Image: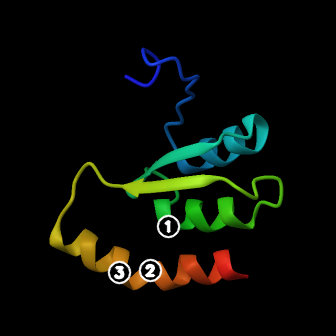
Amino acid sequence: TLRNAGFRTIEAATGRQALELADRDKPDLVLLDIRLPDIDGFEVCKQLRRNASLPSLAIVQMSATFEAATASEMERRRDEVLAVVRG
C-alpha cells in the first residue's frame, strides 16, 4: 500500500468530502474514482482544477467498475476537464 511505502494518505468517501480534504490538506496527488455517491469524479476534477490553492495538483482518474460506457463518458468529458486546465 501507499502507507506501507511511507506516503501519508487521506481517504474521502464522497466527492464533497474529497474537495474539503483537498482544500484543507493540499495533497500532491489525488486518486479519483469517477463514480462517487454524490458528485461524479469529472465534476470533482473540474472543481479541483479551479482551486487556485492547488496549482500543481496531480489527478489520476479511474473507475472500479470500468465499462465501455465509462470509457466513452471519459472521452466525452475529457475536453470539458481539459478546458478548465487550459483556463
Q: Residues within 10 Å of mark 1 (few under 14, many from 20)?
A: many
For the residues carrying marks 1 and 3, which lies nearer the camera in this image?
Answer: 3
The reply to whether callout 2 and callout 1 are in contact (CB within 8 Å) is yes
Give the residue pinned by disc 2. Answer: 77
Q: Is residue 16 left or right of residue 76?
A: right
The reply to whether callout 3 and callout 2 are in contact (CB within 8 Å) is yes
The N terminus, quarter of image: top left
Q: Secondary structure at mark 1?
A: helix
Distance from Cα at disc 3 to Cα at disc 2? 6 Å
The C terminus, quarter of image: bottom right
Tell which circle, 1 or 3, labels the residue nearer the N-terminal end. Answer: 1
Asked if one can make out residue 21 in the rendered structure from this viewpoint, the answer is yes
Q: Residues within 10 Å of mark 3 (few under 14, many from 20)?
A: few
Q: Is residue 83 above or below residue 59?
A: below
Give the residue pinned by disc 3. Answer: 75
Q: Secondary structure at mark 2?
A: helix
Amino acid carrying label 2: it is Arg
Q: Nearer the viewer, residue 22 or 59?
A: 59
Q: In percent of the image, x 66 and y 53: which residue is there? A: 57
- Rendering coords of residue 43 (x, y %): 56, 66
Q: Quadrant of residue 82?
A: bottom right
Give the residue pinned by disc 1. Answer: 42
- Rendering coords of residue 39 (x, y %): 52, 59
Q: In percent of the image, x 35 and y 80: which residue is there? A: 75
